[in-house]
Image: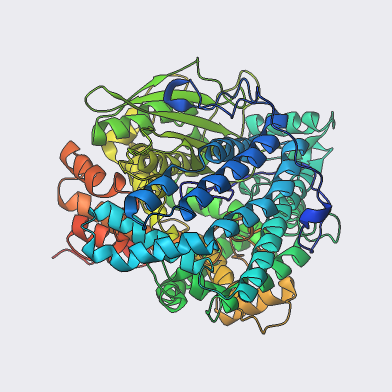
Amino acid sequence: MATTIALAACSQQSNEQAQQPAPAPASTAPAKASTAAPAPEVSAVNPFLEQSTLPFQAPPFDKIKDGDYQPAFEEGMKQHLVEIQKIADNPDAPTFENTFVPMEKSGRLLTRVMQAFNAVSGANTDDTLQKVQEDEAPKFAEHQDAIVMNDKLFARIETIYNQRDSLKLDPESKRLVEVTYKNFVRGGAKLSEADKTKLKDLNKEESSLSTQFTNKLLAATKAGALVVDDKSKLDGMSEGDVAAAAEAAKARKLDGKWAVTLQNTTQQPALENINDRATREQLFKNSWDRAEHSDANDTRDLIARIAQIRAEQAKLLGYPNYAAWKLEDQMAKTPEAAIGFMDKLAPAATARAEKEAKDIQDVIDQQKGGFKVEAWDWEHYSEQVRKAKYDLDESQVKQYFELDNVLQNGVFYAANQLYGLTFKERKDIPVWQPDVRVFEVFDKDGTSMALFYCDYFKRDNKNGGAWMSNLVDQSKLLDTKPVVFNVANFTKPAPGQPALLSSDDVITMFHEFGHGLHGMFANSQYPSLSGTATARDFVEFPSQFNEHWASDPKIFANYAKNYKTGEPMPQDLVDKLKKSKTFNKGYDMTELVGAALLDMSWHSLSADTPKQDPDKFEMDALTKAKINLSYVPPRYRSSYFQHIWGNGYAAGYYAYLWTEMLADDAFQGFEDKGGLTRENGDRFRAMILSQGNTQDLATLYKKWRGKDPSIEPMLLNRGLKEAPQKK
């Protein structure tokens, strides 16, 4: 179907950041339609009722008010069900043209409001939007179930599916039939009526609890900010970062204080620079315990129940656990394959992390610190190790990474060199917040092909992390071109100061723009198969592949320039950065594998398993996986693991690792054929980026690469294996 009834966010695995606002009261009971407030009437002037007249059908954010979303959602679902029922009730024999084509055309109003709402509620939310989110989430679940479990509709789909080999369908149409049929079956279309009712109730409850989790975590992350009233406690932080902390405190009406806000991840950027160990420990613990204070923002009971629900859903659908259900249509196919892949990484990652810890401990001992390295020491002392090993200072590096220059002369320039794209900023397209910028994207022949929005600065009312999504999907059937956006959480500079990025921030920009390219280059007939509508363990491949161009010599030289003088980064500093490429990779990989295995552990529970204590479960899972190094905590704890409880990555966080393998193998393929060339770029665009989900993804990759992906480039690139010596 054309409409996705879910909050979608594609979050970057490095450099994920802050959250905020107040949550609604928690409830573990499913919402009941009979007690809900009457649905608001949709006004004739509601801007969603008509297709936007803006370029590319971009949403008219200047006309959309908070009060427009809920009535448009209700009307959109109502219209969509009428359209679906008309297809189901068609007295003519089912054909592809009278079933699948109108399904793809259905739900246009709902799609319009959903995509605009996803953007605003993720990046610029408020109490009203959070309330809409909590009210509508269980209704969306019901709506989706009403379609997937429509017996008459499924009978038509199944008939065409069974005839697909004899219908002379083009390859993309046949793929649509197969994907849609499997989605319906996996959604419960073949269950008995009694089991359908049980599944509907579980889906509704899960949707409600997942939304509550997101809103609680937003509030918990805001409340977890480290507030200090003694500036000396922030000794070591740059003047710009201290000024930003003062601005953050002022925004919270804490004049005369400093607030170090939290990112999504366990570790916090400020830990690198804060000299006072007690302050570092407090900041780390604020992050670690943010959602575990037994208050209104505590998420533990919610996640324990969500894990139970998912196990029960899987059992109803005939699977031993949720992970087995979730991975069936992924590249990995089974939890065993995903875990086996991670098992190949874990020993090398932890062994390297232990060596890195020894280097850090040596520095601590040399300074007569008198303590053993802990998680809150790692960032601080590893930076000292990096300075000692590579004579590299991140604060010095930042002077060459001014945000707009990285965007225009790095991210956009790489897209120009590889694919011939050019970009023109548009000031006339309305946006959801003044910081948001819009660019029109022109293809290699000069034709206008897409709009690209970017919203890069951290706000208290923005979800943590970084992500890409669509405001308009590409579809030749619907005659629509892509409108895509990137969101990040970079620290906003104090007024008059430049926005300087860390090396990780630069990678984040390239990463999310890689998702953007996947959306912009979409060239599908059907919206359901367009752009990033792929398996989780494929969708991160184009983005992680695009990260590689950040360090390509030609691209790097074009953007790494001093923000004051415009001078290029000195060659000795470039060399130091290059030499430090695999620095701390043991730590990075261990925290990532730890989070992925934790996700897989939660979603490998059977329906017969009693409700878990999240703290004990987490410790037991990490111990069992032999990845519980005290000084390398998982990238996310269960209680603030937004990816798996709120963002659709349940049993899928391993995808970041899996797609690192694809990305590194793909980049090796580029290097084997000359690296940064238009010929390579055009071929990658044609065979990968434009294809969406129109083919089997493993086959798609193999066609382009000429072979199955290898893990070797990943191990070498991440410093987990020594490169063979050249003879």
Q: Position of residue 449 (x, y in %)?
A: 33, 28
Q: At 81% from the left edge and 59% from the top edge, which residue is drawn?
A: 27
Q: At 74% from the left edge and 47% from the top edge, which residue is drawn?
A: 135
Along the line of sight, the residue nearer the viewer: 423 or 502: 423
Way the structure is coloured: rainbow
Q: Position of residue 436 (x, y in %)?
A: 55, 26
**Quadrant where the image shows the C terminus:** bottom left
- Write down the quadrant of residue 521 in the picture: top left
- Write down the quadrant of residue 288 in the picture: bottom right
Tell me: residue 688, above or below residue 703: above
Q: Is residue 393 visible?
A: no
Q: Is residue 253 left or right of residue 351?
A: right
Tell me: residue 287, above or below residue 308: above
Q: Is residue 298 left or right of residue 139?
A: right
Q: Position of residue 197 (x, y in %)?
A: 66, 69
Q: Is residue 49 visible?
A: yes
Count of picture labels: 0
Q: Position of residue 473 (x, y in %)?
A: 43, 38
